[in-house]
């Protein structure tokens, strides 16, 4: 890579460059190098920074402006999709098969992308974060088969979405709706969706200035929350319940 970017030091606890110093083009590219240790990853998320790179590249760290987010009280499902949900037998749970979700996300084709950015190194890093209670999967089950899901990282009262997939049409939408529903119940106001796309905007995502986003992340990640699996706390949501939520 010919761009002159800050190189992260070997020490995983070393600070990141400020998010405001990220490049304008490509938008949000902040630094390279380092590793994907839990210490470094959690430090990155606390400062609104995330890793995103392809096989064969160095680890690249990003903090785009503007940022795409969901307010948990602003998630939208269309009337048509609500009708579809009422007829589906799916149930939504959390953290019962994190590895199946991240593997399904890695296999899921993306428009404009050849292959996946969820490399073996990335997979191992987030599986370790899950083992430590910081990364979570939201799973849409059709019997014993996954119809969709998502995974991300929680710190304090902030959730950072990483990737989602649909094995069946609407599977990822149901997972995101369930996540927003539970987080709203818990008093968590925000889900980081990282980068804008039309699908996210159609579900109620909005763009906010990086400065505002980073200030909100600083406050929300400082709140107390136990790092542990969400299986019991999240419980189970049916599609009929999701169809009734506003």
Image (tube, grey):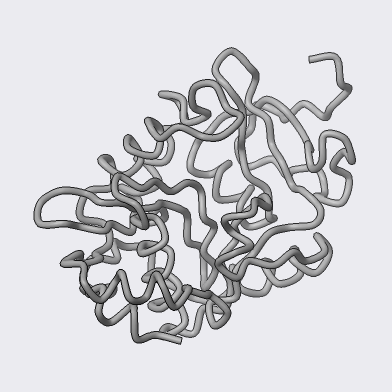
Q: Please state if 180 lies on the left or on the right of 63 as rendered.
A: left
Q: Is residue 129 above or below residue 179?
A: above
Residue at 68 percent of width and 48 percent of height: 49
Residue 64 at x, y percent in the picture: 77, 48
Residue 60 at x, y percent in the picture: 68, 30
Q: Is residue 115 above or below residue 123?
A: above
Task: Locate residue 210: give its quadrant.
Answer: bottom right
- Seen from the viewer's position, the closer of residues 165 and 231 is 165
- Seen from the viewer's position, the closer of residues 9 and 81 is 81
Residue placed furthest toward the left: 143
Q: Please state if 30 lies on the left or on the right of 36 as rendered.
A: right
The reply to whether residue 195 is visible in this rendering is: yes
- Seen from the viewer's position, the closer of residues 84 and 206 is 84
Residue at 16 percent of width and 57 percent of height: 142
- Seen from the viewer's position, the closer of residues 228 and 56 is 56
Residue 211 at x, y percent in the picture: 84, 64
Residue at 85 percent of width and 14 percent of height: 2
């Amino acid at each position: 890579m010919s761009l002159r970017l800050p190189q992260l030091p070997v020490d995983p606890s070393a600070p990141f460059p400020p998010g405001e110093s990220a490049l304008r083009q490509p938008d949000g590219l902040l630094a390279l190098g380092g590793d994907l240790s839990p210490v470094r990853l959690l430090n990155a998320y606390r400062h609104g920074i995330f890793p995103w790179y392809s096989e064969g590249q160095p680890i690249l760290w990003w903090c785009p402006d503007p940022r795409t987010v969901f307010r948990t009280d602003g998630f939208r499902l269309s009337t048509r999709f609500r009708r579809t949900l009422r007829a589906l037998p799916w149930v939504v749970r959390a953290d019962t098969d994190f590895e199946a979700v991240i593997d399904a996300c890695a296999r899921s084709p993306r428009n404009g992308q050849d292959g996946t950015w969820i490399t073996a190194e990335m997979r191992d890093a987030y599986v370790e974060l899950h083992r430590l209670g910081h990364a979570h999967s939201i799973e849409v089950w059709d019997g014993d088969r996954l119809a969709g899901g998502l995974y991300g990282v929680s710190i304090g009262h902030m959730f950072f979405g990483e990737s989602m997939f649909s094995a069946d049409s609407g599977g990822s939408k149901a997972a995101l709706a369930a996540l927003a529903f539970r987080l709203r119940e818990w008093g968590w106001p925000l889900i980081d969706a990282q980068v804008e796309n039309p699908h996210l905007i159609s579900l109620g995502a909005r763009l906010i200035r990086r400065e505002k986003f980073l200030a909100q992340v600083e406050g929300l990640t400082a709140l107390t929350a136990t790092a542990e699996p969400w299986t019991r706390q999240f419980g189970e949501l049916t599609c009929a319940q999701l169809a009734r939520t506003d």
